[in-house]
Amino acid sequence: MYNQLIPNDFMTISEEEKRKVILTCAQPTGKLTLGNYLGAVRNWSTMLENHECYFGIVDLHAITTPTKPATLRQNVFDCVAQYVACGLDPEKCHQFVQSHVVGHTELAWILTCLTPIGELQRMTQFKDKVAKLGFKAAEQEGEEIKFTHDGARAQASINAGLLCYPVLMAADILLYNADLVPVGEDQRQHMELCRDLAQRFNHQFSETFVVPDAYVGETGSRIMSLADPTRKMSKSDENERATLYILDEPGQIGKKIASAVTDSEPVIRASPEKPGVSNLLAIHSALSGQTIDQLEEHFAGKGYGILKEELTEVITESLRPVREKYQELIQDKTYLRSVLAQGAEAAQKRAYKVLSKVYRKIGLPDRSKG
Ligand code: AMP
Ligand code: TRP
């Protein structure tokens, strides 16, 4: 299979490939939130014209936590349909599923052999996940996890995939020699590991990988929970009124905005003491394109009821085309499969070049020569 997939124009560098390569990935977790849309996917869609863009749906990362096979399959389709509906035009970028491309797990293994266990145990996200699973996380950052008595009993439930998760992420990036990786703030530490691994490999086996830069969007683009505006809007929130999904029906949007937390001072302005109102204004501004100053002026002397009514309208109308497009696309699995097949082909072509170079450098057979 490996040999069959090697492209004929193996060593030629096309014009397209000279453009900066942007790559980012997300787990197929089902419905995208308004935070995912405004903080990530919508921004990615602005990069398509001037860069070569790869968007990975990382199903192999998804199985680090228990996932039902049917749900995983469905989530992959939901994910690509939402991406296309949000403006990631498949004619202008490559959308692929991680497990469709040979090389991610191969490179991950090679990088695993260059990664001290301690570095992985120090990853904040790993410690958080472990803590959630019943472990007591290390008291101080930088220390290894101290297992409590209870934790020791829970140890069996921590699979090695959770620990190695950041190495697979590094492989996702280095396999494409990506220049720029748009990620959320919480992925900074994983990006540092990725850069370290690239440098370590280059140092040990000579220049091979591009050391990628993380591109973390402005903190201003953080959309907060509607129920607790001091916390990030998140898909894992248990309160269903806290999170807006891009596929929510107009009725749901209205209910969620109507119950959004504000404060008792009936003045519509953005300020740190008014996190709820600031968040509503930020959402309005991000969708309507009006500045916060313009909105404050527009709403001067008006009450929260008016703000919520108008905001509901703005959200509903902005998301209507996305929802409608999604509903059309999700019926058409043949089309979605073709988007992913085209994406995987382009990704594979690029991935083989890097993987074959890596194999040669470390003394593994260069499979491209057959
Ligand atoms: P996650 O859903 O946490 O896997 O995040 C996927 C992407 O969406 C990352 O780039 C995050 O930075 C972005 N994102 C998630 N939640 C929010 C939010 N509430 N506000 C802004 N961006 C977000
Ligand atoms: N770890 C990332 C997250 O949880 C997802 C991810 C996997 C990723 N591989 C990646 C992001 C490669 C950027 C590049 O959000």
Image (tube, grey):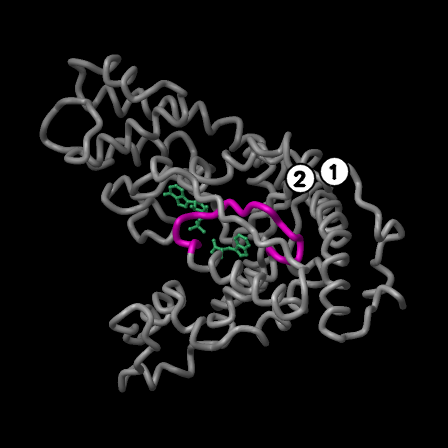
* Residue 123 in the image: above or below residue 277: below
Residue at 63 percent across and 70 percent down: it is 204
Task: Find the magenta span and give its range.
Answer: 173-188
Horizontal placement of 279 versus 3: left or right?
left
Task: Tell me which residue sits at (65%, 63%) in the image.
Answer: 104
Which sits in the foreground, 99 or 219? 219
Q: Earlier in the sequence, mark 1 or mark 2?
A: 1
Q: Where on the picture, by quarter, is residue 283? A: top left
Residue type at mark 2 is: Glu
Q: Is residue 227 left or right of residue 192?
A: left
According to the picture, the residue beneath numbered tag 1 turns out to be 16
Q: Mark 1 and mark 2 in contact? Answer it, CB < 8 Å.
A: yes
Residue 246, magenta (yes or no):
no
- Residue 74 visible in the displayed image: no
Q: Amino acid at mark 1?
A: Glu
Q: Is residue 180 magenta?
A: yes
Residue 126 vertical placement versus 250 (above, below): below
Residue 299 horizontal/vertical position (percent): 23, 16
Q: Which residue is mark 2?
A: 52
Q: Quadrant of the N terminus?
A: bottom right
Q: Report the Cα–Cα distance between label 1 and label 2.
A: 7 Å
Tell me the element at label 1: helix
